[in-house]
Amino acid sequence: MKRNEGYITLGTSKDTSEFCCDCIKYWWENYGKENYPNAYSILAFADGGGSNSSRHYIFKEDLQKLVNEIGIEI
């Protein structure tokens, strides 16, 4: 909030999990690392429907792969 900036990504992917992880990765690599060098985690809010349901394993699996790849907790 101190930066007074926002970020939005638009896309056409039909796979919510893949799209979300791609967006987080892009943001982290191009903005997050530089602007928040002391960050130890990323907080992401998402609705509970579709493939990002809290009961759906694919989204959790994809998020864990992303965590392993970028080295920061989500």
Image (cartoon, helix red, strand yellow):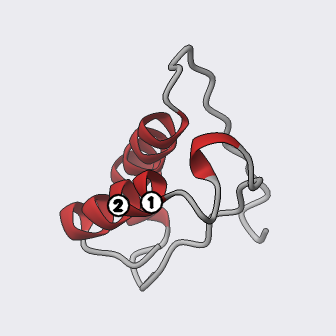
Numbered label attached to residue 57: 1
Q: Quadrant for the N terminus, please.
A: bottom right
Residue at point 40%, 60% (across, down): 63
> Circle 2: is it few (<14), some (14-19), or many (20+) Cα within 10 Å?
few
Q: Give the label, 2 or 1, closer to the camera.
A: 1
Callout 2: SS: helix
* Alpha carbons under labels 2 and 1: distance apart: 6 Å
Q: Quadrant of residue 54?
A: bottom right
List x then y, in percent, for residue 44.
63, 64
The answer to whether 5 is drawn above or below residue 13 in the figure is below
Residue 37 is left or right of residue 12, and the answer is left
Numbered label attached to residue 5: none
Residue at point 33%, 51% (across, down): 29
Residue at point 37%, 49% (across, down): 25
Residue at point 64%, 55% (across, down): 53
Q: Quadrant of residue 3?
A: bottom right
Numbered label attached to residue 61: 2
Callout 1: SS: helix
Labelled pair 2, 1 in contact (Cβ < 8 Å): yes
The answer to whether 61 is drawn above or below residue 15 in the figure is below
List x then y, in percent, for residue 34.
39, 62
- The answer to which of 65 and 41 lies nearer the viewer is 65
Q: Amino acid at mark 2?
A: Glu
- The answer to which of 33 and 40 lies nearer the viewer is 40
Residue 10 is left or right of residue 35, and the answer is right
List x then y, in percent, for residue 55.
60, 64
The answer to whether 16 is drawn above or below residue 49 in the figure is above
> Circle 1: is it few (<14), some (14-19), or many (20+) Cα within 10 Å?
few
Q: Amino acid at mark 1?
A: Tyr
List x then y, in percent, for residue 16.
55, 35
